[in-house]
């Protein structure tokens, strides 16, 4: 059997530049073969040019791209033979020297809060004096301080801030990212955030998957007021306005978002003290009725029924999962067996930045056959980072993943986490040509250069969109 995988589609004639041949790679992590779980989580389907265990011989490896799609990959001479035999005009292929580096699929950041205004470095001090993340939120800070800044920002301000972040993400190898609203918490600002996400996606080069997160926190105007307007009985718990806000999300925000067709997913921060599983369920049900796919911030800080709810509602992904219950973990494991897997999208940079010593139990997930993805959670409060290679490093150091398991988590499994598993996340004929050329020679070295491994060349839909200055 040949090591070359080649497409069979008819190329037709093409202008110069329609093709791209990446040559001289020491290794290609193809990630071919679909969503990974269990032992397969460790399989990056890596081709190595120099012989060795999985070596394919022949020295250097290549990837051929035609009109934005991958057409062949493998040892360079065979790739050349294949594309010639398939009728592609060799002279229309621009050449790109991978210079003995690793080629991987473009990285996919499956969980970001990309669009926001302001920063929150002051919370660091509050937390180091002992204030918990949710205490800061309860006192009107945290997410709510970003909400105030985001409501006050113009679309142009939000665009400019997000563009700067996207440039950093691109330099770190990200070619696709999920991006949430959730810093508006009113119809106008939620729509503005989603509109900004759509404009950024259309402007490229990073492809964005928009998520509506109206259920991120209860805004100040809904807090501390009785649901019915009736006075609260002495000694009764003060109504927190959460139910009234859930009704606002369901009756006002979701219909407006659905009408405009500007979100692919709906997400909720399901956490004791924020939105209960019941309240989250109400939002997710309504979102499903509007045709949105579902994902969930689940069990970030304590077991809150999030993993269980994600399975019950058929979420595509359950995110965070730093503190799932045993019941929740078992539910995720069962879902993975039934062919409707909920991807466990883990966010170790968040646990790290919050100074937690407890990380999501990634090894238990993998042993239970649950597919694991990794993401930055990029946001101003709990994870101000742009770097998936850094997230891979933290996952290896703190959650005991291997570099290959971590790479699976930011490529093919992340593609499934955002519902794009058929289009991106691996280097296989017919898939979109989203690729990164790294200046390290192996998957093992990617997370090894702590905070230092940046992309050398990034390719989106077959086009070079980033080159690191020499
Ligand atoms: O995923 N936990 C909820 N949401 C974000 C944090 C948002 C913020 O603090 O601004 C998260 O960590
Ligand atoms: Fe988040």
Image: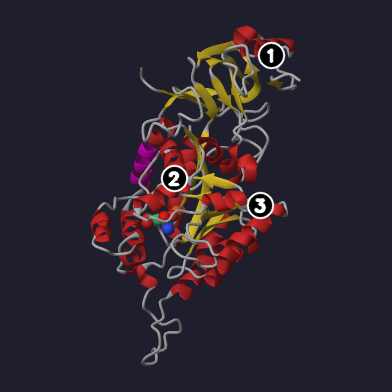
Is the CB of the residue bearing disc 2 within 8 angstroms of ligand 2?
Answer: no
Is the CB of the residue bearing disc 3 within 8 angstroms of ligand 2?
Answer: no
- Residue 469 colored in magenta in the image: no
Q: Which residue is mark 2?
A: 376
Q: Residue furthest bottom?
A: 234
* Separation (CA) of disc 2 from disc 1: 37 Å
Which colour assignment does the render follow? secondary structure
Quarter of the image with the N terminus is top right
* Circle 2 SS class: loop
- Circles 2 and 3: CB atoms closer than 8 Å: no
- Residue 164 colored in magenta in the image: yes
Residue stretch in magenta: 157-165
Task: Report whether residue 287 is seen.
Answer: no
Seen from the viewer's position, the closer of residues 22 and 299 is 299
Quarter of the image with the C terminus is top left
* Separation (CA) of disc 2 from disc 3: 21 Å
Task: Looking at the image, tell me whether mark 2 or mark 1 is earlier in sequence order.
Answer: 1
* Circle 3 SS class: loop
Is the CB of the residue bearing disc 1 within 8 angstroms of ligand 2?
Answer: no
Q: Horizontal and vertical percent for residue 371?
A: 61, 48
Q: Horizontal and vertical percent for residue 294?
A: 59, 56
Disc marking residue 341: 3
Disc marking residue 331: none
* Separation (CA) of disc 1 from disc 3: 36 Å
**Quadrant where ligand 1 appears:** bottom left
């Amino acid at each position: 059997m040949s090591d070359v995988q080649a497409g069979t589609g008819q190329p037709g004639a093409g202008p110069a530049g329609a093709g791209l041949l990446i040559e001289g790679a020491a290794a290609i992590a193809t990630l071919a073969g679909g969503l990974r779980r269990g032992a397969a989580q460790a399989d990056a389907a890596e081709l190595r040019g120099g012989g060795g265990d999985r070596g394919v011989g022949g020295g250097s490896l290549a990837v051929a791209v035609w009109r934005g799609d991958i057409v062949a990959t493998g040892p360079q001479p065979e790739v050349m033979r294949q594309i010639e035999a398939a009728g592609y005009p060799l002279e229309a292929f621009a050449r790109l020297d991978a210079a003995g580096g690793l080629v991987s699929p473009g990285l996919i950041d499956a969980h970001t809060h990309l669009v926001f205004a302001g920063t929150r470095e002051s919370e660091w001090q509050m937390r180091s004096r002992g204030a918990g993340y949710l205490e800061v939120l309860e006192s009107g800070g945290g997410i709510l301080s970003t909400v105030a800044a985001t409501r006050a920002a113009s679309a142009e301000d939000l665009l400019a801030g997000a563009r700067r972040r996207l440039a950093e993400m691109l330099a770190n190898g990200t070619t696709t990212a999920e991006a949430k609203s959730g810093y508006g918490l009113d119809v106008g600002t939620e729509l503005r955030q989603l509109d900004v996400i759509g404009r950024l996606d259309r402007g490229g080069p990073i492809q964005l998957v928009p998520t509506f997160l109206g259920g991120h926190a209860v805004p100040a105007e809904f807090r501390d007021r009785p649901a019915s307007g009736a006075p609260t009985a002495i000694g009764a718990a003060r109504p927190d306005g959460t139910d009234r806000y859930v009704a606002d999300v369901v009756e006002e925000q979701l219909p407006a978002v659905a009408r405009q067709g500007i979100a692919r997913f709906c997400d909720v921060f399901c956490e004791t003290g924020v939105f209960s599983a019941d309240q989250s369920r109400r939002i997710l049900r309504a979102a499903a009725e509007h045709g949105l796919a579902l994902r969930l911030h689940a069990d970030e800080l304590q077991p809150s029924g999030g993993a269980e709810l994600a399975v019950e509602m058929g979420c595509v992904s359950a995110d965070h999962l730093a503190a799932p219950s045993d019941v929740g973990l078992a539910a995720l494991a069962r879902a993975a067996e039934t062919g409707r897997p909920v991807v466990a999208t883990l966010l170790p940079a968040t646990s790290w930045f919050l100074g937690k010593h407890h990380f999501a139990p990634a090894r238990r997930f993998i042993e239970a056959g649950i597919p694991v993805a990794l993401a930055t959670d990029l946001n101003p409060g709990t994870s101000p980072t742009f770097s998936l290679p850094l997230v891979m490093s933290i996952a290896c150091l703190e959650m005991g993943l291997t570099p290959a398991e971590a790479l699976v988590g930011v490529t093919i499994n992340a593609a499934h986490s955002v519902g794009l598993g058929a289009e991106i996340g691996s280097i296989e004929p017919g898939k979109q040509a989203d690729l990164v050329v790294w200046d390290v020679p192996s998957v093992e070295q990617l997370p090894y250069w702590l905070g230092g491994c940046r992309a050398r060349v990034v390719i989106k839909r077959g086009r070079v969109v980033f080159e690191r200055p020499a």
